[in-house]
Image (cartoon, rainbow, N blue to C red):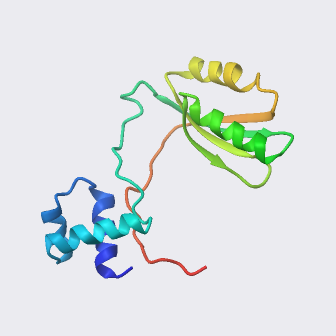
Amino acid sequence: MDRTDRLILEALQRDARIPMRDLAELVGAAPSTCSERVRRLEARGLITGFHAAVDFNALGRAVEAMVFVQVRPLSRQLIDQFHADALAMTEVIAIFGLAGGDDFLLHVGVRDVPALHAFLVDSLSNRREIVQFRSSIVYRHDHKKALEDLTPTDG
């Protein structure tokens, strides 16, 4: 990945809807060259998609929580099934598979605290494979819109 590719990725992270003409001007390349580079970055898996950022509060999900989950017995089949089931739950925004004491971290978005309680009781506590879970309400949720350093690391 060269300097031009990094500039393209930086610009697309800030605004994925930037017109190709403007992107090309920004990175100092012809629009056709820039378009081809974007296609190659997608083909190489560096660009995995273009997404709209949404406001959870505006969608009626004013309360966010992080829910740590332990499942047992640990088996690939059980882990894969729980992962798929959790992703299908409308309250789940994201799921992370973990190493260590917890097996999963669920990022949950719901209307209010009673809805969070209902999710925990109705969707999680009655699942036989879950041996323990704990939740933390999110007071603030920020994330980087763009990675500053796009230099690949060796490893």
- In the picture, the quarter occupied by the N terminus is bottom left
Question: Dividing the picture into quarters, in which one does residue 120 lie?
Answer: top right
Q: Is residue 49 left or right of residue 79?
A: left
Q: Quadrant of residue 46?
A: bottom left
Q: Quadrant of the C terminus?
A: bottom right
Q: Position of residue 94 (x, y in %)?
A: 55, 42
> Is residue 39 toward the left or the right of residue 138 in the image?
left
Q: Position of residue 49 (x, y in %)?
A: 38, 53
Above or below 80: residue 147: below
Q: How far across and how far down the image is residue 123, in percent?
A: 67, 23
Up-down relation of residue 46 to residue 30 (above or below)? above
Drawn side of residue 95 relative to residue 52, left or right: right
Furthest-right residue in this view: 73
Image position of 7 (left or right of 91) = left
User: Eyeballing the image, is 152 above or below 41?
Assistant: below
Near-viewer residue (51 or 143):
51
